[in-house]
C-alpha cells in the first residue's frame, strides 16, 4: 500500500462579499481531506470585496484538490490562485547604477530568506555586472539612450518575461520610466522602490536636498508600478528618525538601508501570495 505525500498549499481568492463564502470554501477543503494551517480574511467596506488567504495541508493530488474547489470558485466568481507554500517565484530584476537594493535581494535570495528564483538581472548600465556575477546570476546590459532603445528593450523584455515564466518584476533603483503600455500589460506584477520624500525633493540628490531642509524622518515606499509615476498601490513603507548632526553621507546610508529592507519585505509578501489588490489599495496578509 502506497501513501500520497502531503502538500502544503496556499490559496488566495477575491470575490464580491456574500454570505456563506467561508463555509463553502471550508467544506471544499474538508472534502479534499485538507487541514487549514493558516487563515486570513478581510472585507473591504469601500469596494464590497472579500479577500482570503489560506494555507492548507492535503495529501490528495492537485487535480482532485482543484476539482473540489472549482464549484465554489465558480459559484462566487472568485479570482483565485493556488500554489505550493514556499515555491520560489520567478523574478526579474532591473537595475541602473545603485547597488544597495540588488545586493540585498541577491544576498537574501542566496541565504534562503527570500523565496524567489532570479534567472537574470538587466541593467541599463554595466556597473552592477560584477555584483550579479558574484552571486552567480546572469547579467545583461541594455543601454537606453533614446526612445527607440526603450521600445526595443521593452519588446525584448516582453519576450523574456513570457519565455522565462517571470512572475514578478523588480525595479531595484532602475532609473528609467517604463512605457504606459508596458505598465498596463504587467499591472500588479511590477514593484518599485523609492525614497519617501516624494513628491518633495524631486530630481537629483534628494538626500542633499533633505539635509539642507533639516528633515527629521527618512523613509522608503515599495509600490506596484502603474502608468501614474510613483503613484501605484502601496505595498510597504518604513521610516527612520534622523538627527540634525547626521551628514549628507550618513543620510544616504540610512536611506539606502531602509530602501533595501522595504523592497525585500514587499518582495517576500508578494512571493508568498500575501498581497492582494483592492482597486488603488492593497490588502496585506502579513
Image (spheres, rainbow, N blue to C red):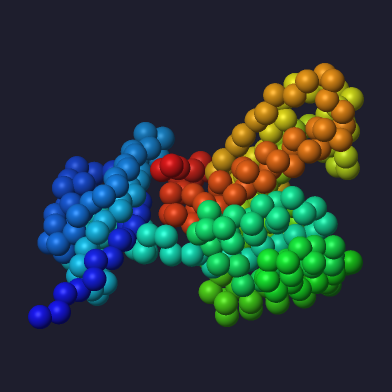
Q: Residue, x 80% and y 53% (percent of image)? A: 98
Q: Is residue 262 left or right of residue 149?
A: left
Image spot of residue 52 (x, y percent): 32, 47
Q: How many marks?
A: 0
Q: Residue furthest left?
A: 1
In which quarter of the view is residue 216 placed?
top right
- Evaluate whether residue 14 shows in this view: yes
In which quarter of the view is residue 75 placed?
bottom left
Image quadrant holding the N terminus, namely bottom left
> Which residue is nearer to you in this view: 93 or 42?
93
Image spot of residue 129 (x, y percent): 79, 67
Q: Is residue 167 left or right of residue 204?
A: left
Image quadrant holding the C terminus, namely top left
- Evaluate whether residue 151 shows in this view: no
Image spot of residue 114 (x, y percent): 54, 56
Q: Residue furthest top?
A: 244
> Which residue is nearer to you in this view: 88 or 177?
88
> Which residue is nearer to you in this view: 149 or 252?
252
Residue 272 vertical position relative to residue 146 in the rendered view, above or below: above
Q: Residue, x 35% and y 54% (percent of image)? A: 12
> Which residue is nearer to you in this view: 177 or 45?
177
Q: Residue, x 63% and y 43% (percent of image)? A: 261
In which quarter of the view is residue 182 placed?
bottom right
Image spot of residue 230 (x, y percent): 69, 45
Q: Residue, x 62% and y 72% (percent of image)? A: 119
Residue 175 vertical position relative to residue 249 in the rendered view, above or below: below
Amino acid at each position: 500500500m502506497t501513501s500520497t505525500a502531503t502538500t502544503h498549499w496556499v490559496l488566495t481568492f477575491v470575490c464580491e462579499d456574500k454570505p456563506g463564502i467561508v463555509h463553502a470554501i471550508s467544506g471544499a477543503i474538508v472534502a479534499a481531506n485538507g487541514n487549514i494551517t493558516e487563515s486570513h480574511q478581510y472585507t473591504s467596506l469601500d469596494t464590497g470585496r472579500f479577500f482570503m488567504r489560506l494555507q492548507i495541508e492535503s495529501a490528495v493530488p492537485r487535480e482532485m484538490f482543484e476539482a473540489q474547489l472549482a464549484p465554489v470558485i465558480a459559484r462566487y466568481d472568485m479570482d483565485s490562485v493556488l500554489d505550493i507554500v514556499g515555491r520560489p517565484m520567478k523574478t526579474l530584476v532591473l537595475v541602473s547604477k545603485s547597488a544597495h537594493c540588488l545586493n540585498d535581494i541577491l544576498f537574501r535570495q542566496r541565504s534562503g530568506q527570500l523565496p524567489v528564483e532570479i534567472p537574470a538581472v538587466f541593467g541599463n548600465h554595466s556597473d552592477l555586472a560584477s555584483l550579479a556575477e558574484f552571486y552567480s546570476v546572469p547579467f545583461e546590459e541594455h543601454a537606453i539612450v533614446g526612445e527607440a532603445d526603450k521600445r526595443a528593450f521593452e519588446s525584448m523584455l516582453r519576450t523574456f518575461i513570457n519565455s522565462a515564466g517571470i512572475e514578478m518584476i523588480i525595479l531595484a533603483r532602475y532609473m528609467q520610466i517604463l512605457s504606459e503600455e508596458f505598465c498596463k500589460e504587467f499591472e500588479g506584477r511590477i514593484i518599485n522602490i523609492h525614497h519617501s520624500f516624494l513628491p518633495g525633493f524631486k530630481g537629483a540628490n534628494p538626500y542633499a536636498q533633505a539635509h539642507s531642509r533639516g528633515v527629521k524622518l527618512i523613509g522608503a515606499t515599495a509600490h506596484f508600478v502603474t502608468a501614474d509615476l510613483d503613484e501605484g498601490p502601496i505595498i510597504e513603507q518604513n521610516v527612520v528618525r534622523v538627527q540634525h548632526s547626521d551628514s549628507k553621507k550618513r543620510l544616504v546610508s540610512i536611506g539606502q538601508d531602509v530602501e533595501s529592507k522595504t523592497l525585500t519585505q514587499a518582495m517576500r509578501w508578494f512571493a508568498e501570495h500575501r498581497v492582494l489588490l483592492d482597486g488603488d489599495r492593497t490588502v496585506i496578509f502579513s
